[in-house]
Image: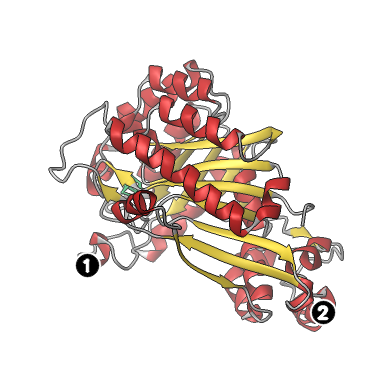
Amino acid sequence: MSSLPLALYVHLPWCVRKCPYCDFNSHALDSTGETSSKAQLDAATEKQYVQALLADLDHELRAWPEVAERPLVSIFFGGGTPSLMSPAGYQAFFAGLGQRLALQDDCEITLEANPGTVEQSRFEGYRQAGINRLSMGVQSFATEQLQALGRIHSGEEAILAAEAARQAGFDNFNLDLMHGLPGQTPELALADLQQALALKPQHISWYQLTLEPNTEFFRRPPRLPDEEVLVDIQDAGAALLAEAGYANYEVSAYAQPGYQARHNLNYWQFGDYLGLGAGAHGKLTRQQADQPGGLLIERRWKTRQPQAYLSRLLEGRDFLAGSESVTQDQRPVEFMMNALRLREGVAAEIYNQRTGLPLTDLQPLLDKLRQQGLWTDQQDRLACSELGWRWLNKVLEEFL
Ligand code: SF4
């Protein structure tokens, strides 16, 4: 499957403290809840974690040796809070990675940074280590909303962090912002967006707060804006972003021309990715005659608890917690749940290439959606129409 793009996701499972809305695999570094502007992993844990990531990669390459022939199109350090790891930690990781895998010349390498854990010298170090894109978890610039979200930074610190990133040479960065926050009005949501736009990011992820199971907010829900207010926020915010030149190319993603997030595009286009680190997930594909369409598509995930993950290094064990192949029945819906998040959808030809299944199997359903005005008229694309985009969940239900 050398023609299928391969990306790398690396998970850093620690945060300064746990945010009440967060259902990611993140664990408080400091149980006292104390924060520091220089928060970071201790040197011994960092060194061990980098060793574990590389050992994890070695296990992956033993299970999937053909992956070593495929250069990486993108790398994403997500979390948790990857900016808790020092530039030296990333340098050590890249040195080991380079001995095992090749990177495409224009490989996009993104680091998620929490504005409460970074300063300019650290940004410069990340840049020198090879990171060429930042994604900053700002969420809001308003003090009241940040406090309600349990964030460790102020709005002012977020502004300073974005400016420091630019001064350190980052000319490609994303700001993560949430809306529909406790006590938020359309005016406050727009003020957040206007502040974000003033920082001139190339990309903005603007998504609505949802209450996820296994979070503090789910157990004790805050009072969120009414449905009508949420619709007003969504409409006004989308209009503001469009006016400022940011295209809404995915449900929650807005980009200036040429700055779509390549790593995420690979997920949405059903590409492959290695997942390294505690709780990381990966998806890999290879030709195998006894599988549907002659393709084995395997999802693989790693042990979640940071200490259990590190123990596996010391015990010389594999880091895998589980794996399963994507069945013939699951493939159409998994493909569409990703591809249809994209406003322009995907080229029709990649359906067969990436699922192993003929697109003709879906033709009756696509014809029905087209008759209902929910599907594009372009025969060479798989995409919703304007109407279908507004009723995306209804369209996806049809593939279930
Ligand atoms: S900083 Fe991000 S990953 Fe960490 S707890 Fe908060 S939302 Fe979750």
Read off the residue under disc 2. Answer: 363
Please say whether residue 341 is visible from this viewpoint: no
Q: Quadrant of residue 171?
A: top right
The answer to whether 37 appears left or right of 54 in the picture is left
Q: Is residue 271 above or below residue 158?
A: below
Q: What residue is pinned by disc 1?
A: 219
**Colouring of the image:** secondary structure
Q: Quadrant of the N terminus?
A: bottom right
Residue type of the residue flagged with mark 2:
Gln
**Residue sitting at x 46%, y 59%:** 231
Residue 380: percent from left, percent from top: 86, 62
Residue at 72% in and 55% down? 344
Residue 69 visible at all: yes
**How many neighbours does mark 2 have within 10 angstroms: few (below 14), some (14-19), or many (20 or more)?**
few
Gap in angstroms between the C-alphas marked 2 and 1: 44 Å
Tag 2 secondary structure: helix
Q: Whole-percent x and y of residue 213?
A: 32, 68
